[in-house]
Image: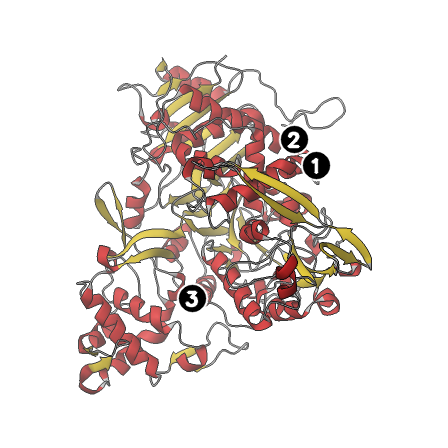
Amino acid sequence: MLFRTPSGAPSGRLRRGGRIRTLAIAAIALTTTAATLAPTAAATDGRSGDRVSVARSGSLSATIRYTEYGIPHITADDYTDLGFGSGWAQAADQVCVLADGFVTLRADRSRHFGAEAEPEAALSGGKDNLTSDLYFQGLRNTRTAQKLFAEPAPRGPGREVKDLLRGWARGYNAWLAQNEIDDPACRGESWVRPVTVDDLVLLSHAVTATAGQVMATDGIVAATPPSGDRARSARGAAADPDEAARGARELFDRARGTMGSNAVAFNGDTTANGRGLLLGNPHYPWQGGRRFWQSQQTIPGELNVAGGSLLGSPVVNIGYNDRVAWSHTVSTGTPMNLHELKLDPKDPTVYLVDGERERMKKRTVTVRVKDGSPVTRTQWWTRYGPVVTGLGRGLPLPWTAERAHAIGDPNAAHMRFFDTSLAFGKARSTAGLLAGLRRTQGLPWVNTVAADSRGGSLFTQSQVLPRITDSLFERCSTELGRATYPGAGLAVLDGSRTECAPGTDRDALQPGTFGPKNMPTLKNAPYAVNSNDSAWLANADRPLRGYQRIFGDIDTTRSLRTRGGVEDVSAMAARGRLTVEDVQRLQFANRVPAGDHAAAGAARACAALPGGRAVATDGTSVDVSAACGVLERWDRTVDADSRGALLFQRLWERLRRVPAQDLWKVPFSPADPVGTPRVLDTDTPALAKALADAVQELRAMGAALDAPWGEHHFVERGGTRIPVHGGPHQLGVWNMMVGVWNPAGGGYTEMVHGSSHIQAVTWDGSRCPVARTLLTYGQSSNVLSPHSSDQTRLMSREKWVTPRFCEKDILASPELKVVTVRERR
């Protein structure tokens, strides 16, 4: 239970009297060895026969029990100690990746790695280290994130999250102080340093603003007012609406393409035992700071949750407990907008609001540079946010003598993301998840899909969005906004009128945002599914409508991944009697919807080519006759042993660029959004050329046209190739894997991102959830760790981990190692 102070407010710390009884019993049964852990020793080191290690004593402590695959079960008496154990355990597995991220947050990349190098993209949106550092140094100078952290709840983070963050920083630092790093990625490097709570607060800010200010880093740093001849030449210049519309679509499509996901929840009417069933399949990078990390976090009587955490997070972000399970998918909501500023003709750093002059705030920022003098730049801020001169390469926003643009991002103005995740970990049902969302309102750019032990299912697009209604858009949109809003959801509002600022819902915690009542939500449907399209077809039989355009669109073409997912899960729900094994099969079915729609037609068109030849892009006449049978015999999957998948993928890589009206005979219809478009137009000239190019390419790299997919779609770990099944988003594969195409190296030679922390969860009436998980790239990024690729090898064989949640199961682990971690006095 949560103990309270005499005033009734939560104290934030729980009674510390004694260790947990079950652990005490376990400790008696096991041999205890006092030792300071080596860098990767937390799960692996110790003399033969030793199953308990104890670090040196200090004021904070936690017990970490490691089971198979290096998964830690962290137990503590209160939130500060729980954060301590989590920081320690994350450092043991991911110290180099974490330390690299903290260099970014400290605006020190240029000093350590050079100004022109490209930053790791987990936290930074800058094109180079200098740009990244200038952005983050600006945040540090103004203490933006720290001020948000200091806000009282509910607008700011709660006491429990603050305690978790303080404990996490001390746990990370304690690990550094008590261990020598053996990871070659950062061993002996001066940039590996202790952290502060301020570093973690900036990390939270960067994660939350990923799809807003962080995405606009280059444009914020580059923003410079016109002057002299430049001002005169810039007069009247404006972004081209058509190019801007295309650029905005590409910007958000690219962003969602690097952070996708699938999730499906089935309600009790569809399952074998009447309880809910969840499959969560986030698609996240395999390298760098956006990796997930598995753990179980326990404060007896207060919290008991397991799942995946983003690196640096003190809480489980996607997971389950004994009553409820949830996952997230990247949403189509556009969490930022632009304000077009009308400038004073005499001074481009003064803008007009309701006819009154308002001066921009000038921020001078200086960063240190390796082997060079410090660099100083200025940034310009308005009441709406920073001035920005572009969003990506395709959406320039020139600052002229008449106009400039400022970016509005409500996710850069709150610090509640971790509070929402903690509320989920405590929830006892899908209704409890919704209550936690209403109370904390902290999700920045994701949907939530969930199931519970009572048989409930849930989809909700409850996220922090600027309150831009379609009616506000009609009243206040600029010409540029009329181009970018319909297709991409990016509103450009008239910043010269206060009436055009985003409004505030009555039930919203944060000014300028939508409240919970406006969030697209589907409760207790037979299934609820999302694959990064809008909320519209979360259930094709119960489509969601009536939400504002900024949340996403309706009545437009869905991705092949969405279409294939809806086909599969709706058929499963109709069949009923579902079990956890059914969703495991769905995850690794590796069906290719693009192949179902196009492979047979491509094979027929191939067979009809005169002389079995087609002309490639370079003018070469290519004998493609052998490809016809390969396409016909292909099993329409991307299993590792699938023959023909490689040929079809290289063919489809070209065909997907053909305009839809030229590729399909049956066009998209809102009346049949899952079934259309369909029927490959075999008469399109692009088909024969694409086939010739694909055959020519595979022969040039020495690959057989019917080579097994896994022979050319793999990762290399420890000098050994590991075949990887699954395939890219464009094929429509649920088990999305995005590889690096390197024909000289043998094909797709590394996974950039894709299936990451996968979980299949249901319940059976006991207090132990029925769960299967898989962290596809393993717990540790340290190549010397036995847990750097053990789950990758498991994944390659389409195997899963049966995680240990209940005490009896944890204590029964044949690989159990118990570590008591403490601060040194």
How many numbered marks are there? 3
Q: Is residue 367 left or right of residue 609?
A: right
Residue 273 showing in the rendered view: no
Q: Within 10 angstroms of label 2, few (less than 14), some, or many (20 or more) residues?
A: some
Q: Which mark is residue 153?
A: 1
Disc number at residue 344? Answer: none
Residue at left offset 70%, top offset 50%: 382
In the image, residue 69 lies at what x, y percent? Answer: 34, 36
Marks 2 and 3 sit apart, C-alpha to C-alpha, by: 44 Å
The local crowd at label 1, few if under 14, some if 14 to 19, many if 20 or more residues have their Cα within 10 Å, is: some
In the structure shown, which secondary structural element does the residue marked by tag 2 occupy?
helix
Query: Between 585 and 716, which is closer to the camera in this rendering?
Result: 716
In primary-sequence order, the first of circles 2 and 3 is 2
Q: Which residue is mark 2?
A: 159
**How far is the residue under mark 1 from the one under mark 3?**
42 Å
Circle on res. 564: 3
Q: Quadrant of the N terminus?
A: top right
Q: Are marks 1 and 2 in contact (CB under 8 Å)?
A: yes
**202 up-or-down from 163: above or below:** below
N-terminal-most mark, 1 or 3: 1
